[in-house]
């Protein structure tokens, strides 16, 4: 069964959403690893991931505040990354469901 052009566009859009959300999540996880292992905060890569975390993971910043700040930031980063992956997958599935049904030609 061939897909229609509209269905292909919806499928492509769903894939783009899932990939973008996954990349954001991966960069937030990288920041969590850098924080946990006490990477040099002035390193450009660490600064870049911190910027991504601040831009896209702000909603979990200071959510948990255990006595060890390093552990707290790592947990908060991991939670933000998990939310991005779950939200990306849910939105991707919604986009695929909204795709017009392809008509079968006999």
Image (cartoon, rainbow, N blue to C red):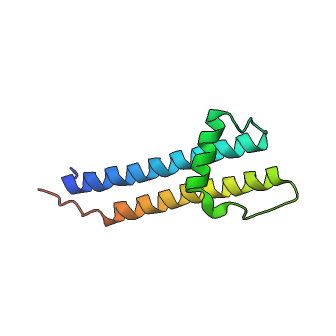
Q: Is residue 74 left or right of residue 48?
A: right
| Nearer to us in this view, 10 or 69 | 69
103 relative to 62 in the view: left or right? left
Q: Position of residue 55 (x, y in %)?
A: 56, 54
Q: Is residue 105 visible?
A: yes
Rendered-image quadrant of the C terminus: bottom left
Q: Position of residue 87 (x, y in %)?
A: 51, 61
Tell me if residue 4 can be seen: no
Vertical placement of residue 38 versus 7, above or below: above
Write the residue at 72% across / 65% down.
Answer: 63
**Left or right position of 78 against 16:** right
Question: Of residues 21 and 1, which is closer to you in this image?
Answer: 21
Q: Residue at x 66, y 58 (%)?
A: 79
Along the line of sight, which residue is nearer the eye, 94 or 2?
94
On the image, the x and y values in percent for residue 59 come to 62, 63
Residue 10 lies, in percent from the top left, at 30, 56
In the displayed structure, 66 sits above or below 45; it is below
Which residue is nearer to you in this view: 91 or 35? Answer: 35
User: Along the horizontal axis of the image, is 82 left or right of 40?
Assistant: left
- x 60%, y 56%: residue: 57
């Amino acid at each position: 069964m061939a897909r229609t052009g509209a269905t292909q566009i919806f499928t492509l859009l769903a894939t783009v959403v899932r990939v973008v959300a996954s990349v954001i999540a991966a960069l937030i996880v990288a920041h969590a690893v850098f924080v946990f292992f006490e990477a040099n905060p002035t390193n450009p890569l660490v600064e870049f991931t911190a910027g991504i975390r601040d831009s896209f993971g702000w909603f979990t910043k200071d959510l948990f505040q255990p006595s060890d700040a390093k552990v707290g930031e790592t947990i908060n980063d991991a939670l933000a990354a998990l939310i991005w992956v779950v939200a990306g997958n849910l939105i991707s599935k919604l986009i695929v469901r909204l795709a017009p049904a392809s008509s079968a030609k006999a």
